[in-house]
Image: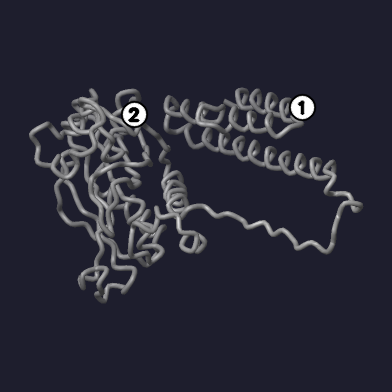
């Protein structure tokens, strides 16, 4: 691994030294930091590495990634200064001090993007890898492979935007978990962020929204592991004093299943309109992976156990920032977006 990263670093150093234009620098960024770039390839190779070596190799890859990012940032700044020096506008002879100044207005990341990156950072710190998948799925991956057959009532809430035949806009990012399990042997720790689609539309639901679903498969994974992971995550996102509780629930792809609540962050548990005077707010669903799902991906349910969870990013953002209408995220009102 060290030799491989050293080879990539030498290749990167050679290319960035010869880079003299923004276009070639952009291509260099794609080749090393893009979805199909060098760094992502190295991260995918970690799946085949023994668990006791993953931490050391992961650190080497992250160090290399930061090195590439910093070098590209410095090079971009250098190219910008060079272009400014060559520009006629930089000459005092063409500078008119009587003209009004031009103020650059800095942009900001959308609040959904900010919360997504924060959630990803927390789970990556717990050893989870980020995986992505298609937004158009077959009926099999979106429903059947998750133990939701055609006549199951759990489809009523999700049987929604069909594209053609059995192709559907995914209603959750759980299909990514099936794709990964079909192509990778356990142990696994993954999260799957992305857009999902359902027909709901009101102040707390939109036809398109964002989810992050997680999966952990290993030997002897228990419900106590699930409780520990959820508590760490929720206290990181909402504060160390956040109280967490689990309520029995039902999801076809987990057994046992639970709804996870947090003490209302608006009223501190005293009771308010947001929490319907209960002092608690439902935040996500979770549970232990149903052995029926393992059977469909050819995992030995006698050897492996797993935990899974899913959460809506908009719901997290609304509670975190005190937003009372989910539609504000998608109306592109700068008065709203500039607050973040």
Q: Residue at x 24, y 71 (%)?
A: 279
Q: What secondary structure is found at the residue carrying circle 2?
A: helix
Residue located beneath label 1 in the image: 18
Q: Residue at x 24, y 68 (%)?
A: 275
Q: Which label sits on residue 180?
A: 2
Q: Residue at x 39, y 53 (%)?
A: 330
Considering only vertical position in the picture, is 283 above or below 197?
below
Considering only vertical position in the picture, is 242 above or below 61?
below
Give 184 or 164, whichever is nearer the viewer. 164
Task: Classify residue 328 by image quadrant.
Answer: bottom left
- Residue 225 visible at all: no
Q: What secondary structure is found at the residue carrying circle 1?
A: loop
Q: Position of residue 289 (x, y in %)?
A: 22, 38
Alpha-carbon distance for marks 1 and 2? 39 Å
Q: Residue at x 33, y 45 (%)?
A: 211
- Residue 81 visible at all: yes
Q: Position of residue 219 (x, y in %)?
A: 28, 34
Is there a contact, CB below 8 Å, between mark 1 and mark 2? no
Q: Position of residue 175 (x, y in %)?
A: 28, 33
User: Is 324 positioned to the left or the right of 75 in the image?
Assistant: left
User: Is 85 positioned to the left or the right of 79 in the image?
Assistant: right
Give 78 or 128, whichever is nearer the viewer. 78
Give 293 or 195, whichever is nearer the viewer. 195
Q: Position of residue 59 (x, y in %)?
A: 55, 38
Around disc 2, counting alpha carbons within 10 Å, would you say few (fewer than 14), some (14 to 19), or many (20 or more)?
some
Q: Earlier in the sequence, mark 1 or mark 2?
A: 1
- How many dots with numbers? 2
User: Is 45 positioned to the left or the right of 4 in the image?
Assistant: left
Around disc 1, counting alpha carbons within 10 Å, would you say few (fewer than 14), some (14 to 19), or many (20 or more)?
few
């Amino acid at each position: 691994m060290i030799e491989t990263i050293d080879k990539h670093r030498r290749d990167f150093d050679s290319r960035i030294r010869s880079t003299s234009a923004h276009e070639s620098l952009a291509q260099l960024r794609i080749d090393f930091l893009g979805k199909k770039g060098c760094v992502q390839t190295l991260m995918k190779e970690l799946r085949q590495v023994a668990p006791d070596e993953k931490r050391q190799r992961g650190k080497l890859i992250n160090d290399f990634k930061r090195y590439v990012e910093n070098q590209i940032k410095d090079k971009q700044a250098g190219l910008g200064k060079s272009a400014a020096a060559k520009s006629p506008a930089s000459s005092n002879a063409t500078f008119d001090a009587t003209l009004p100044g031009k103020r650059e207005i800095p942009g900001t990341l959308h609040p959904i993007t900010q919360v997504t990156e924060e959630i990803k950072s927390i789970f990556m710190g717990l050893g989870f890898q980020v995986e992505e998948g298609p937004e158009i799925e077959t009926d099999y991956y979106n429903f059947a492979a998750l133990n939701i057959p055609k006549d199951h009532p759990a489809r009523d809430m999700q049987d929604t935007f069909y594209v053609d035949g059995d192709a559907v806009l995914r209603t959750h990012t759980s299909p990514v978990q099936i794709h990964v399990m079909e192509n990778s042997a356990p142990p696994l720790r993954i999260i799957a962020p992305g857009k999902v689609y359902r027909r709901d539309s009101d102040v707390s639901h939109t036809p398109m929204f964002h989810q992050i679903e997680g999966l952990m498969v290993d030997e002897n994974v228990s419900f106590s592991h699930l409780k520990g992971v959820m508590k760490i995550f929720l206290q990181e996102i909402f504060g160390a004093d956040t109280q967490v509780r689990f309520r029995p629930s039902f999801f076809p792809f987990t057994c046992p299943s639970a709804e996870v609540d947090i003490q209302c962050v608006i009223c501190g548990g005293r009771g308010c309109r947001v929490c319907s005077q209960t002092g608690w707010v439902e935040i996500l669903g979770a549970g232990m992976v149903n052995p029926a799902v393992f059977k469909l991906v050819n995992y030995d349910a006698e050897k492996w156990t797993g935990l899974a969870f899913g959460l809506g990013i908009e719901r997290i953002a609304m509670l975190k920032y005190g937003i009372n209408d989910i539609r504000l995220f998608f109306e592109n009102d700068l008065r709203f977006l500039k607050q973040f």
